[in-house]
């Protein structure tokens, strides 16, 4: 019967709405869900959880916009892309996981932050620093863990939300949530037209005129459905389907006068998970299929790939009085079909496993984990991690040492196009990471201070050979170290939030005696970054003032050129009268009309105004 | 609680003031001060718009970013080459698909010529006419030097690159872009018509005319790989001599070498090129020679090379994301000078 549920649900809901009794939003108690507690908690890595993400963001905010104001991520925006850097690492060193499944492109290793809308998720966790022993390849700088939130509490919610701005944005969102004692579901649909016709000061033209950003249209559609079934008190089944489609014009570099480039990113992601819990053991059996369908076109250029990755994963969890064991096996099949590679179809099978042991007593938690991977044509070393967390009155001390890695991408290995060639002999990038942190939480003030030092070896760099052909090699050794301070404080109706990071990331291997980059800060890694926000809560209103500071970044490896530091100020006012069906938010982005660049010669919007209207019906 | 607030604020303020240096501007006010030295075009990184122009004066003093300092805007994406024509500098910006025109005495901005797809080189062919090789349109674009506008386009092979004019004929190397072509197109300067197409060898990269009005074309040869990254097949590099529109002789390089950077001396009787072996060293070849040279005169590899007034110049781009170097040699291969220029120094322009 249940398989026809979606059909009936959609039909009946609209019929119900007319006579629905409108209830106030209430904060629902958290109920343990189908999966066990996220296994990366208490591993010694610092984690920032953003729960109920939809309440924190605008529907049109992509994840990069959100993170640069709320974390230490440096977001580079160029063309249609937005890529992250955390703790001085490159954009392929931030791993994006959806319910534990990697979303980073098999071709590039990167996930474009403009392709995830932060509103399409309930929960986001930022795991700072590498945690490859648990998450696998690509977790060197940070890991973003996206999580759906379903619970078996009776509710019935319909939400419609509209975002518009003065640069040609129109974003429509519909979400439906229905759940009862044995069944939970959420369905989400978004359709966005963003012309991106913002104004900017063009510093690349004579007399620096104010230009309009052109050839920047983004058409995107997203559909997501999550279902969870409680078969009985011990057995659960859940499945998710997430489809997104982005058709983007690639805006022109400031120095150029036109662009014909377009990019099409279609993704299909599916997962099904079976959980069993009893007093002796917990296990999850998860199967997932991720498909990336990518096309890039330009004058005389057509590049495309269809990547498929399949994961079948068994996770077993056993809890004893003072210790827990966790064991995970994953089978992974990757298949890439691309005309730009040395052969059209490339297929690989990989096996990953880890074992984790946690010891807990009153004041001390010790965590150890070891990972082993069997990969096609590539030897991956054993990946261990060890951490200790000690509580002393209100202070928390934690120490972590681990090894992290990233395997070369399909492009790194097999590319053969446009004067460049891949290198099948590449090794994995490997790092050793140390972290120490102190945190303190009291009722009103919470802070944590983390010191880190990570040395990444075999860093993959593309360089031209003598014959002019570009090829990647394991050349660089990069040392990243610094500190992060995160704090929040509440006083009466005010909530203060402050994040600061100092990141010194240097190249430790000169390629020859002319190389002036030795010991110098990597390109596009700010030494200083911070953000600060004040939230003021009134009866019907909420005011948020937020500030972002990005320190200067070097655009070249010898520090001979740089982009200026910049400050961005945003102001938000939200009208959310209790029991009202409508909610209004108004946001001013870049309040002081600053002109800034996060990547050389790519424009960013001057002041923008964003309006959101939300309509909600709730029945319980 | 106050304490915490003040601590937070202090940190905030420190972080704002930590690094607040500003970019220096170079002031160049004197006229005619670019007459005695030479220019280096720095490609910059593709997609970053950081291409630039360096000027090296007679005392070997370098001024980087000379165009952007004077005109307060950057040249653009991938500054490919520059030519001085009728007292103007024509700076070809490949990635930005444009040519910036500036006065040669003070480098003051004059105008921008748009309408290209991927311009590579500009060559004056008549008093008021220049040709521009344009990669993606597979044409030579004709420029009216009075109006600085494109007037017409002449179809040629794939990826037109190097140009050379001799006896009212223009020889265009069709290098094939990222693919392979093996022809040169010969164009009549008066009619702007294609006269003939000659098949010379795979990937013709350079063309010069010698003292006898013979044309020399250097073909780099192509490489094809199989699925395991082994070289599946290669074609030989070639040095081809053309006389009266026909190939009269051809010298083949060892299989596996991919020669590039064809140059000729002032008296137009000795050719210079790198023979494309692993170290890409520079060799000389007298036009009357009957075999290819075996001993290099400069045993070092360069990104790009040029020859002027009997000096050979070569660039080194280091890691391609920092300021590169330019080296100056005499024709005997002795290193005379080196100067640091900017990101990916590619080509030279001599007064």
Image (cartoon, rainbow, N blue to C red):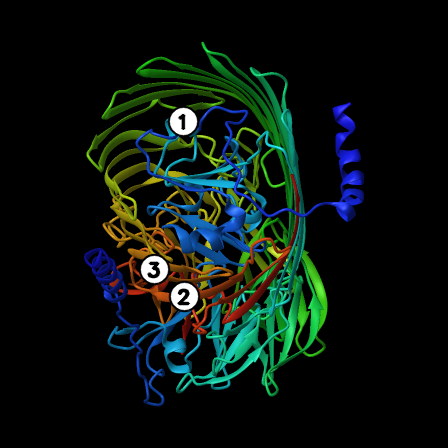
Look at 33% across and 71% down and name the residue there: B64
CA gap, disc 2 and disc 1 = 36 Å
Which quadrant would residue A280 be assigned to in this image? Answer: top left
Q: In this view, does B88 lie above or below B185?
A: below
Name the residue tied to disc 1.
A134
Query: Badge 2 sits on which subunit?
Result: A
* Circle 3 crowding by C-alpha within 10 Å: few under 14, some 14–19, many from 20: many
Looking at the picture, how far across and down is residue A460, in whole percent?
39, 40
Look at 33% across and 85% down and name the residue there: B33
**Front residue (pair B300, B8):** B8
Label ID, residue B148: none
Look at 35% across and 69% down and name the residue there: B310
CA gap, disc 3 and disc 2 = 16 Å
The mark nearer the N terminus, 1 or 3, is: 1
Which quadrant would residue A360 be assigned to in this image? Answer: top left
* In this picture, residue A152 sits left or right of residue A518: right
The kind of secondary structure element at disc 3 is strand
Q: Quadrant of the C terminus of chain A?
A: top right
Name the residue tied to disc 3.
A553
């Amino acid at each position: 019967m249940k398989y026809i549920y979606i059909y009936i649900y959609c039909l009946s809901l609209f019929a119900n709405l007319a006579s629905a009794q409108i209830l106030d939003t209430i904060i629902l108690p958290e109920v343990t869900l189908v999966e066990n507690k996220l296994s990366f908690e208490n591993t010694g890595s610092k984690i920032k959880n953003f729960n109920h993400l939809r309440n924190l963001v605008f529907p049109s905010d992509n994840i990069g916009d959100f993170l640069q104001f709320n974390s230490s991520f440096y977001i580079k925006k160029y063309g249609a892309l937005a890529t992250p850097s955390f703790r001085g690492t490159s954009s392929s060193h931030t791993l994006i996981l959806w319910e534990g499944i990697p979303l980073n492109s098999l071709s590039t290793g990167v996930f474009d932050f403009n392709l995830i809308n932060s509103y399409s998720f309930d929960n986001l966790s930022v795991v700072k620093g590498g945690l490859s022993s648990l998450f696998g390849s690509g977790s060197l700088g940070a890991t973003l863990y996206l999580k759906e939130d379903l619970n078996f509490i009776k509710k019935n919610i319909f939400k419609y939300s509209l975002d518009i701005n003065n640069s040609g944005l129109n974003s429509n969102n519909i979400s439906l949530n229905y759940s009862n004692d044995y069944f939970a579901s959420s369905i989400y649909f978004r359709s966005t037209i963003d012309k991106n016709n913002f104004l900017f000061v063009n510093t690349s033209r004579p007399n620096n005129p104010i230009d309009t950003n052109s050839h920047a249209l983004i058409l995107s559609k997203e559909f997501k459905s999550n279902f969870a079934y409680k078969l009985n008190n011990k057995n659960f089944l859940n499945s998710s389907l997430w489809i997104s489609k982005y058709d983007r014009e690639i805006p022109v570099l400031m120095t150029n006068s036109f662009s014909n480039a377009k990019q099409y990113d279609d993704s299909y992601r599916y997962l099904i998970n079976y959980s069993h819990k009893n007093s002796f053991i917990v296990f999850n059996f998860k199967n997932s299929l991720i498909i990336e369908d990518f096309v890039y076109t330009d004058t005389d250029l057509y590049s495309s790939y269809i990547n498929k990755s399949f994961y079948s994963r068994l996770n077993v969890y056993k809890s004893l009085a003072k210790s827990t064991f966790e064991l995970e096996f994953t089978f992974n099949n990757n298949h890439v079909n691309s005309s730009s590679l040395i052969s059209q179809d490339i297929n690989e099978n990989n096996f990953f496993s880890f074992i984790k042991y946690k010891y807990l007593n009153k004041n001390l938690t010790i965590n150890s984990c070891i990972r082993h991977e069997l990969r096609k044509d590539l030897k991956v070393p054993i990946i261990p991690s060890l951490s200790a967390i000690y509580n002393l009155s209100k202070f928390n001390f934690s120490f972590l040492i681990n090894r992290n890695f990233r395997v070369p991408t399909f492009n790194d290995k097999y590319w053969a196009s446009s004067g460049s060639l891949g290198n099948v002999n590449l090794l994995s990038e490997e790092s050793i990471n140390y972290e120490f942190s102190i945190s303190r939480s009291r009722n009103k003030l919470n802070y944590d201070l983390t010191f880190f030092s990570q040395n990444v070896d075999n860093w993959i760099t593309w360089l031209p050979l003598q014959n002019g052909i570009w090829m990647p090699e394991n050349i660089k050794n990069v040392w990243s170290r610094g500190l992060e301070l995160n704090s929040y404080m509440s006083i009466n109706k005010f909530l203060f939030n402050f994040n600061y990071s100092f990141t010194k990331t240097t190249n430790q291997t000169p390629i020859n005696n002319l190389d002036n980059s030795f010991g110098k800060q990597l390109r596009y890694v700010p030494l200083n970054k911070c953000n600060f926000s004040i939230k003021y809560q009134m009866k019907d209103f909420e005011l948020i003032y937020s500030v972002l500071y990005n320190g200067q970044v070097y655009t070249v490896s010898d520090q001979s050129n740089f982009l200026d530091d910049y400050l961005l100020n945003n102001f938000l006012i939200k009208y959310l009268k209790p029991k009202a069906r409508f909610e209004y938010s108004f946001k001013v982005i870049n309040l002081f009309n600053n002109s800034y660049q996060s990547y050389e010669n790519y424009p960013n919007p001057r002041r923008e105004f964003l309006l959101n209207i939300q309509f909600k019906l709730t029945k319980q | 609680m106050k304490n915490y607030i003040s601590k937070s604020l202090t940190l905030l303020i420190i972080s704002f003031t930590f690094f607040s240096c500003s970019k220096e501007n170079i002031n160049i006010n004197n006229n005619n001060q670019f007459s005695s030295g030479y220019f280096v075009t720095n490609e910059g990184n593709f997609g970053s718009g950081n291409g630039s122009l360096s000027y090296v004066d007679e005392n070997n003093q370098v001024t980087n970013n000379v165009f952007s300092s004077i005109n307060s805007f950057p040249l653009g994406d991938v500054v490919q080459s520059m030519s001085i024509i009728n007292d103007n500098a024509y700076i070809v910006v490949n990635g930005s698909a444009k040519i910036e025109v500036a006065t040669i005495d003070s480098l003051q901005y004059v105008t921008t010529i748009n309408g290209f797809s991927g311009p590579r080189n500009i060559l004056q062919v008549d008093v008021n006419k220049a040709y521009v090789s344009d990669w993606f349109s597979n044409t030579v674009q004709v420029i009216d030097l009075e109006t600085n506008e494109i007037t017409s386009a002449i179809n040629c092979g794939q990826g037109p690159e190097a140009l050379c004019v001799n006896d009212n004929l223009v020889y265009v190397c069709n290098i094939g872009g990222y693919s392979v072509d093996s022809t040169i197109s010969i164009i009549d300067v008066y009619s702007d018509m294609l006269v003939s197409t000659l098949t010379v060898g795979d990937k013709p990269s350079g063309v010069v005319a010698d003292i006898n009005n013979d044309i020399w074309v250097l073909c780099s040869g192509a490489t094809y790989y199989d699925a395991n990254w082994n070289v599946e097949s290669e074609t030989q590099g070639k040095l081809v001599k053309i006389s009266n529109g026909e190939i009269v002789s051809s010298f083949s390089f060892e299989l596996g070498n991919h020669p590039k950077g064809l140059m000729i001396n002032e008296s137009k009787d000795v050719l210079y090129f790198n023979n494309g072996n692993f170290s890409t060293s520079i060799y000389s070849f007298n036009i009357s020679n009957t075999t290819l040279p075996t001993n290099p005169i400069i045993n070092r590899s360069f990104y790009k090379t040029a020859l002027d007034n009997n000096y050979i110049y070569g660039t080194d781009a280091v890691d391609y994301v920092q300021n590169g170097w330019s080296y100056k040699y005499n024709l005997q291969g002795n290193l005379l000078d080196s100067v640091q220029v900017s990101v990916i120094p590619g080509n030279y322009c001599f007064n």
